[in-house]
Amino acid sequence: MVKIKIIIILILILLIFIIGCTNQKELPKINQETEVQEPQTTIKMEVYNPETGKNELVDTIETEVVESAASQGDELLKAACKDSIKDYPEWTKSSTDIIIWEDPDKSFYFRNSPEDMSARLSSPVQTSETLADMDFVGFNEISYVKTKDNKWQIGLFKLNWPDAPDNSIIYEKTESVSSIDVSPVNKKEFIAFYVKGNKAFLEYLDVANLKEEILFETSVGNNNQKVTVSPKGTYVYLLYSKTLRLFDISKKSKIEEINSVSSVVWVGNSHLLYSNSEGTYIYDVVSKSKDKITGINTAEVLAFNPKSDGVIAYTSNSKTKVVNCQNWRISLGSYGKGKIETLTSEKTAILTKEDLSNGGYWRFEGDWYVKLSDKFSVLATVWSNY
């Protein structure tokens, strides 16, 4: 009887052991590949609060923009951005977001910053004339181009606000042009690009000594044009029919020609940042070499400001982004549906929103917007020269 009880007890112990082993095999495995969420890094940034009218320190999340290692082009861009501020005229470096513009109804306006009110000015262009282009040539002075019938003129317009503006015509030419852009080398020298008949011309003008010289001639294209002198007045680029051409002004000679370019901007006096169908590149004018950058793939519009070691704004697929040249990981701002027109400072841009008929200041430092116009006919900021 005792032996039977011992056998039964041993059988029960064995059964318990077998059941325990079976249950252990059915326990769920721990997932060794589960990702651990790391805390996001924040940095302190000073931004403007329109409700209080003051700058405030806020925590901004540091986001990853570029995951790949820096390329040779990235390093060249960083260096070019950091050194570029010394190339620009002293009057450009004042802390201002000044803009001057013309509406389609030919109303003429001036505004010093997003925080200030717009002021309506007497236009230097009569109702029978057409304002074709304008650029800042001093902190409170612009050059402008106007056309009428078979004549075009270059003038200087001083913004002596609140006094009456000072306006003078410094150059006049009798010929009919269908379009014209003029970029100032200084207040006495200009580079003009104009379309006359079935030809387009790039011309150097010395208005003080009445000298004119054709730098380049081509057949008429069907795309927008842009002609811009470098910050020190050494070079000029012409973007026309998506072909970028670079010229040495003093030698009156062409340096480079690049096809399929959508946008280009000066980074200091001797570097260009441009985007084409293959990507975005930094071009060294002195060495005549180009290097691809990794931070931007392709862009429809590029803008640059040399302050804060370089700020780049660009629009790609209707989305606008702003980054600092020295750290692509930090996004300074982004806008989902809008096109960058130009930068007014290292913290503000002119942005055309959504349906491309609503233009105004975009303070990406703080992300707020001030509408200025349903549409700009012609506009200029201190930094749109380049």
Image (cartoon, rainbow, N blue to C red):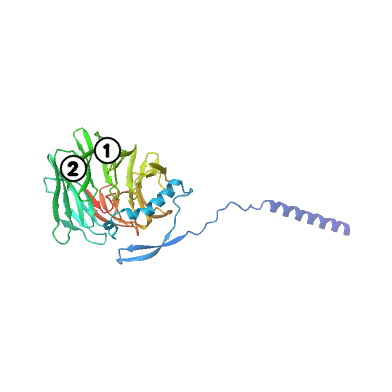
Position of residue 279 in the picture relative to residue 9 (left or right): left
Number of numbered discs present?
2
The answer to whether residue 374 is visible is no
Label 1 is placed on what type of residue? Answer: Asn
| Residue for point 86% across, 56% down | 4
Q: Secondary structure at mark 2?
A: strand
Q: Label 1 crowding class (10 Å Cα cut-off): few <14, some 14-19, many 20+?
A: few
Residue tagged by mark 2?
211
Residue tagged by mark 1?
223
Q: Give how far across and how far down residue 265 sits, in percent.
A: 32, 47
Q: Is residue 163 above or below residue 272?
A: below
Label 2 is placed on what type of residue? Answer: Lys
Position of residue 213 in the picture relative to residue 3 (left or right): left
Q: Label 2 crowding class (10 Å Cα cut-off): few <14, some 14-19, many 20+?
A: few
Q: Quadrant of the N terminus?
A: bottom right
Between the residue at mark 1 and the residue at mark 2, the CA separation in whole angstroms equals 29 Å
Q: Secondary structure at mark 1?
A: loop
184 and 302: which is toward the camera? 184
56 and 191: which is toward the camera? 191
- Closer to the N terminus: mark 1 or mark 2? 2
